Image: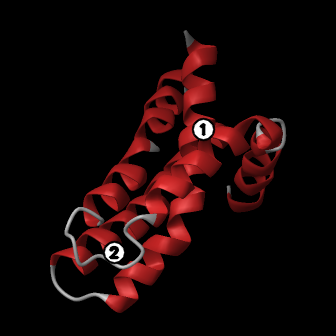
Amino acid sequence: MTEVVAILGLFLFWASALWLPITVLRASMHRGPIQVWSIASIFAFGMVFMGFTRAMAQGSPAEAFAWSISWAMPVGLALFARSPDETVYRKFDFYLGAVAAFGFLPVAPFLPVLLRQASDAIW
């Protein structure tokens, strides 16, 4: 079970990292609810990144488990921000999802190394 959650956490990190540039673009080009949800997604990415790397460096397995699942929050907020019809590059999310799904296997071996290095550098 822990391996499944770890892989899910890596996949959600990968998806969050892919959605981050489009979310920044949407936050800068919109006003109102789209901007609010996009900014919330950006801050959620930063919060989960800091919490996840801290859990890797100093946390318990239960804490790392919780932060692995928390990677769903930035993706969910980014997808929620795209729901209005006037959202910029609204159809681009489908392609980001495809890149996240099919691009995960080639980058999966490098993600733990990258996150471990970030964890060691920060904490």
As shown in the figure, which amino acid type bears the numbered disc 1?
A: Phe
Res. 106 image quadrant: top right
> Which mark, by number, is residue 39?
2
Residue at which label 1 appears: 11
> Which mark, by number, is residue 59?
none
Q: Nearer the viewer, residue 61 or 45?
A: 45
How packed mark 2 is, by other alpha carbons closer than 10 Å (few <14, some 14-19, many 20 or more), is many
Assign a secondary structure to mark 1.
helix
Assign a secondary structure to mark 2.
helix
Q: Quadrant of the C terminus?
A: bottom right
Closer to the chain start, of discs 2 and 1, is 1
Residue 86 drawn at (x, y percent): 23, 78
Say left or right for 119 vs 92. Answer: right
Point 41% across, 43% down: residue: 72
Instruction: Judge whether residue 49 can be spotted in this image.
Output: no
| Image vertical order of residue 103 relative to residue 87, above or below | above
Res. 36 image quadrant: bottom left
Q: Residue furthest top?
A: 1
Q: CA distance from mark 2 to mark 1?
A: 22 Å
Residue 84 drawn at (x, y percent): 19, 68
